[in-house]
Image (cartoon, rainbow, N blue to C red):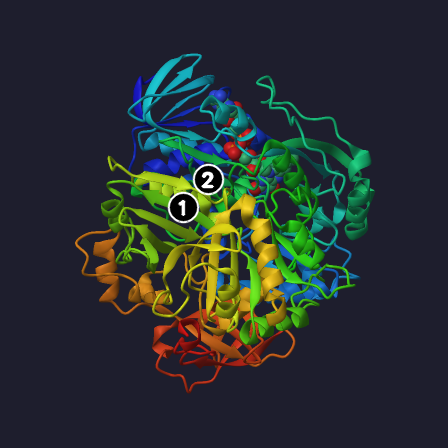
Amino acid sequence: MKEHTRVVVIGGGIVGAAVLYHLTKLGWSDVVLVERKQLTAGSTWHAAGGFHSMNSNPNVARLQAYGISVYKEVEEISGQDVGMHLTGGITIAATSERWEVLQYEHERHRVFGLESELLSPEEIRKLCPIMDTSNVIGGLYDANEGHIDPYGSTQALAKSARMAGAEIYLKTKVEDLVHKPDGSWTVVTDQGNIQCEHVVNAAGLWAREVGMMAGVHVPIVPMEHHFLISGDIDEIAEFDGELPLVLDMDGEMYLRQERNGVLLGVYEKNSTPWSVGGTSWDYGASDLLEPRLENIENELMRGFERFPSVADAGIRRIVNGPFTFAPDGNPLMGPVRGVQNYWSCCGVMAGFSQGSGVALALSQWMINGETEGDIFAMDVNRFGTFATKNYAIEKAQEFYENRFQLLCPNDEWPAARPNKVSAFHDRLQQANAVFGCSYGLEMPLWFAPQGSEPVETPSFRRSNAHEPVGEECRAVREGVGILDGTAFAKYEISGPDAVGYMDYLFASRLPDVGRIRMGPLLLPSGHLKGDLTVMRLAEDRFMVIGSGYLQEFHMLWFEQHLGDNNVRIVNRTEELSAIAIAGPASRELMSLVASGDLDNDAMPFMSVQPMNVGIAPCLVARLSFTGELGYEMYVPGTYARSLYDHLLVAGAKLGIRPFGIRALLSLGMEKSFGIWSREFSPDYTPVMCGFDRFVDYGKADFIGREAALADRDTRPEHRLVTLEIDSNDADAWGYEPIWHKDEFAGFVTSGAYGHTVGKSLALGYLKTQFLDSTELEFSVHVLDKRRPAVILPEASYDPGGSRMRS
Ligand SMILES: Cc1cc2nc3c(=O)[nH]c(=O)nc-3n(C[C@H](O)[C@H](O)[C@H](O)COP(=O)(O)OP(=O)(O)OC[C@H]3O[C@@H](n4cnc5c(N)ncnc54)[C@H](O)[C@@H]3O)c2cc1C
């Protein structure tokens, strides 16, 4: 066994093997994998081995498609048979709602680079003659789906890595991890110690235990999962070909061929978290759990109805095995904040669809310092301290039970809520708020009319929120509205070296004292890393504002670039509340309650100053995402309730009205303001998204400068544009294709109805060849049909920005 190496990957399941292989593929060969028993000794050996490239997130879909291509690659390199069955896969629809959504997905696959096909029930039966299609409306077919041998594929990855220089130590259990002062690690195993630069937690079912060895809480829980293997079925034996992988989401089941029978798996509503207190070191290799037939009876019955010959063939074997789920079902991947050189690669619920994609992204991150494209959906830093053990259990169970449920974009799931609430949550409840949840915090989405249930109907079309949101928008445009901004992330960065540090961190010029600037963060590749608002409170003290769900993501980045600087970085998000008011009457309201001079000269647009508002000491910033005159007040949470009340009482005569996130997004959309994770993300560069106007290209140095200069001088493939869509019942949600006649011209990133301008609007990336063609006719496929669209030359509301500067 080596005593020194660059990376120790802990865990020899499909994920650990894929990480080992990708580290070597990307150029690091001094790497080892340590496995306590033999390869596949965790969830991997139980698995049904099914894989698909379809995913509702385009970057995850891209990585899944890549991962499928890796199986052939490692089979060729290693000579190890991976047992590939590229049968194609069909997702069937047995309800009209599901069918509408599948058709919508099919359209959006154009954006994801996936080539799917819609099938009729007759076409489905040809591919899968054992299916009862009597109530099937149609299906979505993807040729790039199938199943793989879990053992063979893991071995092939491992062998390919070995051939490139990696070493694998079996029957070697990691017992402890010791972090050394220089950031490197001693990996303590029962066979001796290994010194290394990086450790990767790919310990699957034991990831929580391996996390604790480094003091890292891993918010996952294993869930029991069943599939059955049927007896032989004559129709299959006689069938010329192999059955496709079938996903019957309405029936909460999946099926694939297994020899002359089938493997039928179910996601039962009556789910069972497993070993919530921790996974025993004795579990593994050939252990299976006792089947709980009583829990899966309903789903099995539906399976037998869908595939009658399976019922006749009988059950040959039932497998009940555990595999891990993060609260939202996505992997937990990437560097762990506060624990240098410790990498998470666990919670990979669909290891055979996602293992290699996750491993590629992780290896890029470790070797190049960044991933290719936006992988936030899988980033371990999307969770923070709110994702406690019990939170993880409740959420994972909810995810498991609803895995195949038809999900609308405005669905809000109830488990583990309320968790965090703002200081004036009760006031929002009294105002009949409908809440959403972000980063564990309840946020008002919109306010239902008094006397009605504060509940939103899940829908892809305009919901019962449409009219109330319109009223909230009008209140802001015509008078004054008040918004709970508790969710905003607030970081204070100060100290003797703060200016130099900030100047290098941000691509923009730093604001003068008392002023505010937009602050893009760039990756070394010149792609976006952040879209923050920088407020300068003193020569060496800044308040930086961002989206609350990105707290760990931002803090990690800030800390990774701290170096020897004498700088203090404090995340004040939990401690500070924020309340925003916006609208033409907001200055009048402020004049009734605030201590300072509010004139345009004394407090111009994009300025910030401490002020008493009511009786609360606030930091008041003059800006608003609504595009109106507006103020944001940052105040210690203990004052927030009284401040909110004060503003409501004083604002009563001005007709003040609370508004929620939906109205905020609609108002912002009218101004063509983009948001993070939609218009802005590591997928895009400043020139693509228009952030070049904030970048100070003349600055001596900042992260990503060289790449940013190249970006400035190159015509990008796509640019961000605003679209007006001719639609009277539904608005775009994101990733809808934009067409020019029948030519694919780009894609939508987000959409909303603009209540002031009375138009369905969207933002999206258009191929630059179409940019100068505003007279061209475009269309956008929203929900069930292509709808005519035009590119707007400027924001649909107050393009000059006179109202927010007024
Ligand atoms: C019944 C069932 C059906 C499934 N069907 C599918 C499917 O069709 N498609 C799909 O994509 N996924 C499926 N899955 C899920 C799939 O099995 C998992 O996503 C995948 O196996 C996770 O792999 P892993 O490498 O992360 O974890 P694991 O397979 O759990 O591997 C972790 C490894 O780490 C080792 N280890 C842990 N701690 C230590 C330590 N301290 N020292 C050394 N070694 C250690 C363990 O021995 C183990 O070998 C299924 C799972 C089950 C249970």
Q: Quadrant of ligand 1?
A: top right
Q: Nearer the viewer, residue 108 or 632?
A: 632
Residue at position x 79%, y 36% in the image: 295
Q: Residue 55: image x %, image y %?
A: 55, 54
Quadrant assignment, res 473: bottom right
Q: Mark 2 = which residue?
A: 333
Residue beneath the point at 77% across and 36% down? 315
> Does any portion of residue 212 appear in the rendered image?
yes
Q: Quadrant of the N terminus?
A: top left
Q: CA distance from mark 2 to mark 1?
A: 24 Å
Q: Residue at x 48, y 79 (%)?
A: 742
Residue placed farthest to the top in the image?
191
Q: Nearer the viewer, residue 517 or 22?
A: 517
Residue 736 shows in the view: no
Mark 2 or mark 1: name the one nearer the start of the chain: 2
In this view, 537 is above or below 140: above
Residue 271 lies, with reference to residue 628, above or below; the image says: above
* Tags 2 and 1 touching, CB below 8 Å: no
Q: Residue at x 50, y 28 (%)?
A: 203
Residue on which disc 1 sits: 491
Residue type at mark 1: give it: Tyr
Please identify the quarter of the rendering in which residue 360 is found.
top left
- The amino acid marked with disc number 2 is Met
Q: Position of residue 606 (x, y in %)?
A: 37, 63
Where disc 2 sits, the SS reads strand
In this view, 533 is above or below 402: below
> As drawn, is 231 to the left or to the right of 197?
right
Q: Between residue 168 and residue 71, name the one nearer to us.
A: 168
Q: Secondary structure at mark 1?
A: strand
Left or right: 710, with 464 as reference point = left
